[in-house]
Image (cartoon, grey):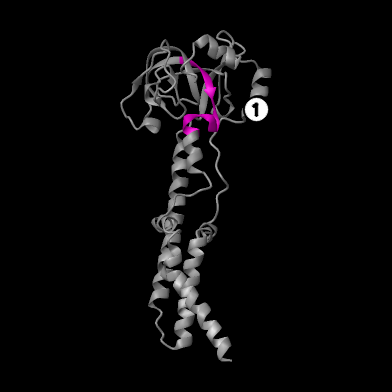
Amino acid sequence: MWHTIPLGEVLKKLKSDLNTGLNEKQIENIRKTFGENKLTENKKEGLLVKFIKQFNDFMIIILIIAAVVSAVMSYIEGTNEYLDSIIIIFIVVLNAIMGVAQEAKAEKSLDALKKMSAPTAKVKRDGIVKTIPSTEVVPGDYIIIETGSYIPADARLIKSYNLKVEESALTGETVPVLKDEKVILKENTPIGDMLNMVFATTIVVSGHGEAIVTNTGMNTNVGKIASLIISDESPETPLQRKLRRSRKKIRTSSTYDMLFNIYYWVIQKNISK
């Protein structure tokens, strides 16, 4: 939305001022609402906990039960045919290992995003330019952008002087984008074409500029990526995908046949008594 409205309206919505920036009272109130400008993450779990959580799926539990039932029946009947059970357990354990590996990969991706965050930011507050930790930047802050620096938050440009920003972290494009604060863009403009905006974790490769912060922390575009990475639903493993697709057909599968066979065997034993 910030790329679609005139700069004057942006300043009005954010209650900021081109001459002085925000004042301390404003900053305190804004920080209470939006919190610190940083990417958050879920509490990290140990490998054992992650491994155990991979079995928290109904279909996986059914497979384990089927393997146990098959092994018990083979033992009771004296056939000693445990190959099916071993294969099922092996696949289930392999699936769990793959799930843990995917979670670890997601955590590394989030760590990589956090490392790209700007350590400090140059801002104008109460008419004074100062350098502060980037975690203290809030929406409405007047920031100064210089060559070689990381952008601390998503912001609408006020001024730009041959400002080129490398945005590959968001768009995948390694060619720097020449910014232009004068343009007003359409609502559905792709991030890579938002010439009047700069974004958190992107880097200035040349020129300099000034901007008003519009979004911080998890509300930035990179924050939305981080939210997907740390969402509670981990990426499905190939086995989980196949199990999900075959839930409706599972009633005719060998798993249910095994469970029915053991049930039938128990009934027969009771009758014979």
Q: Residue at x 45, y 77 (%)?
A: 70
Q: Is residue 13 above or below residue 192?
A: above
Mark 1 is surrounded, within 10 Å at the Cα level, by few (under 14), some (14 to 19) or many (20 or more) other residues, namely few
The residue identified by callout 1 is 33
Q: Give the number of callouts.
A: 1
Q: In the visual, does 31 lie left or right of 11?
A: right
Residue 46 in which image quadrant: bottom right
Q: Residue at x 48, y 62 (%)?
A: 59
Is residue 220 a member of the stretch shown in magenta?
A: yes
Amino acid under disc 1:
Thr
Instruction: Decide if residue 68 is in sight here.
Output: no
- Furthest residue to the left? 175
* Towards the viewer: 27 or 268: 268
* Towards the viewer: 233 or 198: 233
Q: Secondary structure at mark 1?
A: helix
The magenta region covers 210-223
Is residue 218 a member of the stretch shown in magenta?
A: yes
Q: Could you tell me residue 263's position as x and y percent?
A: 53, 78
